[in-house]
Image (cartoon, grey):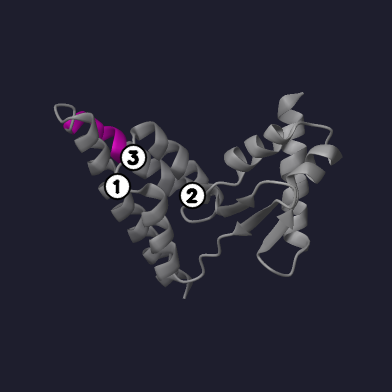
Amino acid sequence: MQQNLSHDIEQYILSRLSSETENFVSLRRKELAEMFECVPSQINYVLRSRFSPEQGYIIDSRRGEHGYIKIVKILCVTPEEKTKHIDDIIGEAISLKEAHKLLAILESRGFITQRERLIIEISLRHSDRIWEDTSILSRERMFAGLLKRMVKGLTQLNETEDE
C-alpha cells in the first residue's frame, strides 16, 4: 500500500511538472497530504527518495503555515552543465554500492547508455579488487575520480556524436 501511495504522489508531482511552462512547480505539503490522505512525512519521503539531485531535481522547501515545496527540474543542456552536475552528484568520494545506484539513475536520465553503464560497473568492480589493500576512504575517493572521468568522457563523446 505504501509503495502505491508513493508512486501516486510521485506521478502527480511529475504530471504537474510536465504541465508547467517553467522547469519548476510550487506545491503545499499540507495540501498534498490532504489530497492523498496521508501524513506530511509521506510527502517528505517521496521528495527525498524520488526527487533528489541525482535524479535531476532540487527541492526548495519552507515549513510552517505559509510553507511551500518548490521542485525544480535540473536542466543540463550544455556539456559544461552536464559535467558540473556529474561533479556535484558524485562528490569527492563514493562507495561501490552508491556508484551502481547513481549509474542506473544516469542511464535512466539519458546521460549514458545501458552498455556504457555495464562497462563502467565492470571497471569499478575490477578496480575494487586492485585497490583492496587501500583504506575504504581512499578507495571511495578513487572510485569517485574514476567514475567522474568515465562518465564525463562518455558524455562528451556522446555530445560530439550527436552533432
Residue at position x 46%, y 76% from top? 163
Residue furthest front as drawn: 65
Q: Residue at x 30, y 45 (%)?
A: 144
Instruction: Characterize the magenta stretch by its predominant secondary structure.
Output: helix
For badge 1, the amino acid type reads Glu
Quarter of the image that includes the N terminus = top right
Q: Secondary structure at mark 3?
A: loop
Quadrant location of residue 36? top right
Q: Which residues are magenta?
A: 123-130
Residue 106: assigned label: 2
Q: Helix or strand or loop: what does disc 2 sit on? A: helix
Residue 155, image quadrant: bottom left
Question: Can you tell which of label 2 and label 3 is closer to the viewer?
Answer: 3
Report, in whole angstroms, how far the alpha carbon at label 3 lies from the one at label 1. 7 Å
40 lies left or right of 93: right
Kind of residue at disc 2: Leu
Would you say 46 lies left or right of 15 here?
left
Alpha carbon distance from label 2 to label 3:
15 Å
Q: Residue at x 51, y 50 (%)?
A: 53
Q: On the image, numbered disc 1 is attached to which residue?
A: 92
